[in-house]
Amino acid sequence: MGEDIVQVKVSNEGAPGDTAYEVAVIAGFVGTVAEWLLFLKGATGDTGADSTIAGPKGDTGATGAQGDTGDTGPQGDTGADSTVAGPKGDTGADSTVAGPKGDTGDPGADSTVAGPKGETGDTGADSTIAGPKGDTGATGAQGDTGDTGPQGDTGADSTVAGPKGDTGDTGADAPTPILDTTAATSVLPLVNSLGNYFTGTSGAAKSLTTYTTTGTTLGAYVEVLINTATEPTVTGATKVSGAIWTADVNMYLIVRYNGTRVEFFFLDI
């Protein structure tokens, strides 16, 4: 159908004119009134702006079909503990996961009834750890004496001490120290390395000023308690360094043999 425009002049005068549909037919439209009305409907316009005024509330529609189950929501906060005990639940099935090991209990009392004997186990593998040493077996019979072998080379000195030898004869008694308290004794015996001791009567100091010696045992010595007005001398002995002799004072006169000569010196008390 073309797009010719039909101008219709409306006048207040004269007989009624053709209807719009009749005019369309005259102009070439082919179809029923209903089809012509559909023809008059233009293209769909743009969506209008949303109304700012709410329309009247419509009737409640029929209940729709149940929708799909929604996703599980986040876990809510733990609720407060109930103050009322709930009903006792059924006994749960045995756990297939072992719980933590409990503390070791106190040892139980020894049983007074023997348990049943277990079956004999398989023979274990040989131990890799030596067992305790067994008792020494009985001495076997002595074998025949073998032929004498050739003399071997002299061996190196042993680093192990040999068996202890027999106890030797009793030696002579060692000299014992002599304590001489005779005031008149002037001969000093050099025969005891443990020393001999000389004083006056009852342990008082000797007042003699001249002494001689007898014996020459190495290391022997004599100690004499003295208190004299003049310096004592020892015949045949050499004076060596010691304390300075002092008149009328208790001192020690020491006489000794050093393997070469007899020496004497003084010591303060």
Image (cartoon, grey):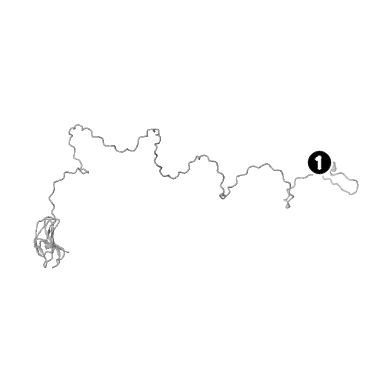
Furthest-top residue in view?
144
Q: Dot 1: few (<14), some (14–19), or many (≥20) neighbours within 10 Å?
A: few
Q: Is residue 26 above or below residue 177?
A: above
Residue type at tag 1:
Ala
Q: Is residue 145 above or below residue 24?
A: above
Quarter assignment of residue 267: bottom left
Furthest-right residue in view?
14
Evaluate whether residue 200 shows in this view. no
Side of 86 relative to 207 (left or right): right
Q: What residue is shown at x 81% (from left), y 41% (from top)? A: 34
Q: Is residue 236 above or below residue 11?
A: below
Side of 251 relative to 2 (left or right): left
Residue that carries the numbered disc 1 in the rendered image? 34
Evaluate whether residue 202 shows in this view. yes
Of residues 81 and 95, which is closer to you in this image? 81
Q: Quadrant of the C terminus?
A: bottom left
Of residues 126 and 262, which is closer to you in this image? 126
Which percent across, then down, holds residue 226?
Answer: 13, 64
Q: Which secondary structure, mark 1? A: helix
Which percent across, then down, holds residue 73?
Answer: 60, 46
Q: Is residue 258 above or below residue 101?
A: below
Quarter assignment of residue 215: bottom left
Q: Quadrant of the N terminus?
A: top right
Side of 97 relative to 191 (left or right): right
How many numbered badges does the structure rendering display? 1
Which percent across, then down, holds residue 208?
Answer: 9, 64
Which percent across, then down, holds residue 21?
Answer: 84, 43
Of residues 98 and 44, which is closer to you in this image? 98
